[in-house]
Image: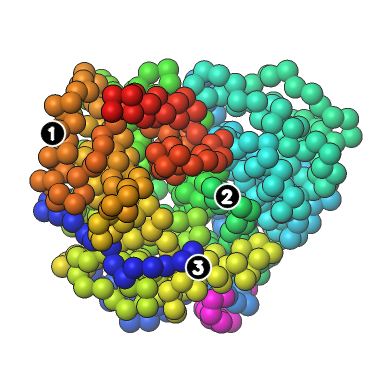
Amino acid sequence: MVVSGATIDSLLKEGERHPPPESFRRHASWHDESVYAEAQRDPQAFWAKQAEQLHWFRRWDRVLAWDPPFAKWFAGGQLNASYNCLDRHVRSERRHKTALMWEGEPGDTRVLTYDALWREVMRFANVLKGMGVRRGDRVTLYLPMVPELPIAILACARIGAVHSVIFGGFSAKAIRDRVEDAESAVLVTADAGYRRGNLVPLKKTVDEALADLPIIKHVVVLKRAGADIAMQSGRDVWWHDTMAAADPWCEPEPMEATDPLFILYTSGTTGKPKGVVHGTGGYLVGVATTAKHVFDLRDEDLYWCTADIGWIIGHSDIVYGPLANGATVFLYEGAPDHPKPDRWWSIVERYGVTVLYTAPTAIRAFMRAGNEWPRQHDLSSLRLLATIGGGRCPIVDTWWQTETGMILITPLPGLTTTKPGSATRPFPGISAAVVDEKGNPVPRNKGGYLVIREPWPAMLQTLYKDPERYRDVYWTPVPGAYFTGDGARVDEDSDFWLMGRIDDVINSAGHRIGTMEVESALVSHPKVAEAAVVGRPHSVKGQVCVAYVVLKRGETASEALTGQLKEHVRTEIGAIASPEDVYFTDKLPKTRSGKIMRRVIRALVSGQEIGDTTTLEDPGAVEEVRRWLAEVEDRK
């Protein structure tokens, strides 16, 4: 990526402050500001202290061996991620505590205690060993959000195999590309999964992906939906058959802390996907620490992260982080608004969820449906909300990436006075900064490039089979620092405000405007539920802002409202950021995890190729945007 332009104009101002409730502060795991000073004084000693919370077969020789840009955390140490998530709890009073509580979209349920999960993991570990999987081998997982996915993940970790989870919405080509790059000999999938009352044909997609691909020797198929599928003789086997024949005991493999734990591929708009490699020791220390303190996990909590395990958030904050802390984790398979918009709120009430971690885009979609849906349910069990808030609960707004592995910028719920829209402060032990293209700090409230100046435990080790690309993409653009690719600013209180991807910055009449700030201004209007802002080429200004807006239920699009929204942005930010055009749409292109795919909208308004859209929640959203563009052009 070429970095150009020293700063990004920061225009949005926010004055709200929300200190944590005193009752929450008193009982929080970290409730004393001294934790920041301790971590800053000696970061390696701080992380070593956190590492002591895990079980090590052999203690490390060095906390960090740093040969920029390659880091070896806890070098010389030996541990096993599966052991830390299961065995040490089974050997304690948590043995019969619930580890996983699951609900499928059709309403079927399962509960697995730590003891039961441990036994399932050992059996499947032996299934993999029976197929010839050994330490360091890669295993591809393409499954719906069912308990067998974390079982398969932890089984790989138990025997030292490197898992590569592929999100269950990816296409056959995406699967093939990832299988070929990882050189997997074993793939685990299901006949189908459920989404919005329909069957997602996972096995059929796998068969298409693996056509004439001899590298895969075994395909394990979970019978999830009873779908009619083809089974290839000599290659395909049923999950339940292999489990019934498997030995029930499997010793955990002692792994070097620096051994790879998993590969997670990031899907770019073009080119070869990047295989992000995360190690074992540093990663587990990072995610166990952040899960415990960002979510203030307590033994009695029922914790629900609504993301998909196919993304890094699911790896870190559904599987490894919470289970390493002995938490009870809730899993849900289907769409958040199926069969009605209150599905999530119904789950919170019925199960008594206490900690909820979700995406702000998901909440905005619920806001469009109206407040009456959550009001139908008793949500009093909730004590902490991550990203969102309901008045009485502390709010945690987190920033991190696939590459960072762990949350890097976040409030601590018992410590931090939050500001709507700000991720606040770097987590203790994290050195973040906002700089220009030469690596120099920019003034307060001036936008620049978010970088991380020092290595952190859960950081990616490299890109699979491509260390030079790792160096060029992440460590070359800004000298001496990890380049996140995000724009940000730091305010007068040293709180961080994310301004969107550098690629999404709009260059208009000499100003560089972060799309996130314009979107924040739009959704602050009482009639707007969601907004996406992109840049469109302009012959004079270079680019202009174009906004796509989803209105709250009952509101009607009109020329008058278009003018009101433009004026609202002028008032909130300034004339330079006021959208040139406002398009009203019923849908925005989103992934199944709720992330708005701005690149799709940007391609549409610029007349470019859209690229891969297989992760879209609703492909019809693209046509919705296209239709509005055509109607506006016709009116012109």
* Quarter of the figure with residue 166: top right
Question: Tag 2: residue type?
Answer: Thr
Precedes in sequence: disc 2 or disc 3: 2
Q: Kindly tell me whether residue 293 is visible in this rendering.
A: no
Looking at the image, residue 155 lies above or below residue 426? above
* Residue lying at 66% horizontally and 66% vertically, measured from the top left: 466
Boundaries of the magenta span: 55-70
Precedes in sequence: disc 3 or disc 1: 3
Q: Position of residue 33 (x, y in %)?
A: 23, 69
Looking at the image, residue 348 lies above or below residue 341? below
* Residue lying at 47% horizontally and 49% vertically, measured from the top left: 313
* Residue lying at 28% horizontally and 59% vertically, measured from the top left: 512
Q: CA distance from mark 2 to mark 1?
A: 38 Å
Judge left or right: residue 594 versus residue 516: right
Precedes in sequence: disc 2 or disc 1: 2
Q: Say if mark 2 contacts mark 1, CB within 8 Å.
A: no
Q: Nearer the viewer, residue 221 or 301?
A: 221
Question: Is 64 included in the stretch rendered in magenta?
Answer: yes
Residue marked by disc 1: 564
Residue marked by disc 3: 474
Mark linked to residue 607: none
SS label for mark 2: loop
Question: Tag 1: residue type?
Answer: Gln
Q: How dense is the environment of label 2, judged by Cα within 10 Å: few (below 14), some, or many (20 and up)? A: few
* Quarter of the figure with residue 44: bottom left
Q: Say if mark 3 contacts mark 1, CB within 8 Å.
A: no
Mark linked to residue 270: 2
Judge left or right: residue 112 versus residue 234: left
